[in-house]
Image (cartoon, rainbow, N blue to C red):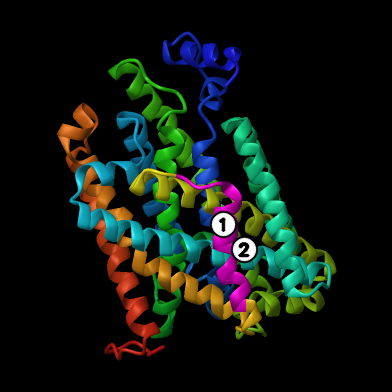
Amino acid sequence: MTDRTTAAIRDALAGRRRGPMAAMLFAGPAVIASIAYMDPGNFATNIQAGAKYGYALLWVVLMANVIAMLFQALSAKLGIVTGRNLAEMCREHFPLPVVLAMWAVSEVAAMATDLAEFLGGAIGLSLLFQMPLLAGMIVTAVVTYGILLFEKHGFRPMELIIGALVAVIGLCYLAEMFIAPVSWGEVALHSVLPQMPDAAALTIAVGIIGATVMPHAIYLHSGLTQNRAPARDETERGKLIKFSNIEVFVALAIAGLVNMAMVVMASSAFHAGHSDVAEIETAYHTLTPLLGIGAAGIFLASLIASGVSSSVVGTMAGQMIMQGFVGFRIPIWVRRLVTMIPAFIVVALGVNATDALVLSQVVLSIALPVPMIALVILTRRVDIMGSFANGKLTDVLAIVGTAIVLILNAVLLLQTFGVDIPGLPTG
């Protein structure tokens, strides 16, 4: 940070600077974390939900986003209060065998995340520029690495770049809303009216939640806040948490609206006559004759921005997880290379890219309980959080949110592996 920015932050914490501009000084961490909620995995699940069930599952998107807000706020609070990120706190407070197991699971989750995000960007580039998928992967890798180099100049350049890509995704879907024929009355109704059209809809609903609450975002947010604006006393910590909560609400509200817009676009374009659309490539090719090449191009632009930005953020999270759990870090290019290898193998083996995206969401579902449960345990402990330990209401909401996500993810996993659940279709 520049001396001017540091002084402005001190003024805001001391109460000498107020209003929206003061809050903007602390903006950034939640914007970066919000990319996880607009990654290519979300594209796949939201398109399937809108195409098959119209607006009926919009309430699921809203619920998933509310749960995500709570856990991102808790993660940010942990970093602000302790000066440590979630992975570091796990290493300090849990037994070594547990820490090693958590690290192994989290590393697999980070690689699965990168697989989905890297493939998403590559699919978008290959469709937009009519290039082979492998060439799209190479371009995505180069662009991602180039953006990661800005990290050495401090957090603000990276925040601005990611913020710009978030804006691209948001503006693309805002434009789609003007192109697609949307029934806004039904959108409003189904956003707040819980319903499950049939048993198969539950599978898609679980997929939406599994693609929304992301393990690496929970780890990452605590690291982005841990040293960004160190507090000198309890009063300043309280103000930092307040500013952080505001940013979490705004950033994830935008991410939630983008996700809802994905469902709305898919519903408006595909539900009436193309309800079987379930793949990103199919969605693109179907959009062109239905809404025109402009709508299809905007869709791909948002997918590319999503893939590139989420790939950058996934690499940042992977580094933080490794450094936190085992105490050392590796060069960016090594980390990028390691996480690219699975994606290249998938393409080389001829595996369907969308199938690979779905598989990555299953892996993330297995890993998700690790950071959620750890975060609930750590943020409710008074010996760690002091006066900022979770209150009873926050504690109850966090436990309920964890239970909801874990139960629904268990349903997804059982169905994926073909376990017969009464009343539900097998995968």
Label 1 or label 2, whichever comes before in sequence order: 1
**Mark 2, other Cα within 10 Å: few <14 / some 14–19 / many ≥20:** many
Residue 338: in magenta span: yes
User: Can you give x and y, in whole percent of width and height, for residue 400 in the image?
Assistant: 24, 56
Residue 409 visible in the current orientation: yes
- Dominant SS in magenta: helix
Residue 260 visible in the current orientation: no
Is there a contact, CB below 8 Å, between mark 1 and mark 2?
no
Q: Is residue 183 above or below residue 7?
A: below
Badge 1 element: helix
Q: How many numbered circles are shown?
A: 2
In percent of the image, x 37 and y 86: which residue is there? 417
Of residues 321 and 34, the one nearer the viewer is 321
Mark in front: 1 vs 2: 2
Which residues fall within the magenta stretch?
Answer: 329-346
**Mark 1, other Cα within 10 Å: few <14 / some 14–19 / many ≥20:** many
Residue 226: in magenta span: no
Q: CA distance from mark 1 to mark 2?
A: 13 Å
In percent of the image, x 60 and y 17: which residue is there? 2
Asked which quadrant contains residue 370, the reply is bottom left
Residue placed under numbered mark 2 in the picture? 118
Of residues 10 and 293, the one nearer the viewer is 10
Residue type pointed to by label 1:
Met
User: Can you give x and y, in whole percent of width and height, for residue 179 in the image?
Assistant: 76, 62
In percent of the image, x 29 and y 63: which residue is there? 404
Residue placed under numbered mark 1 in the picture? 38
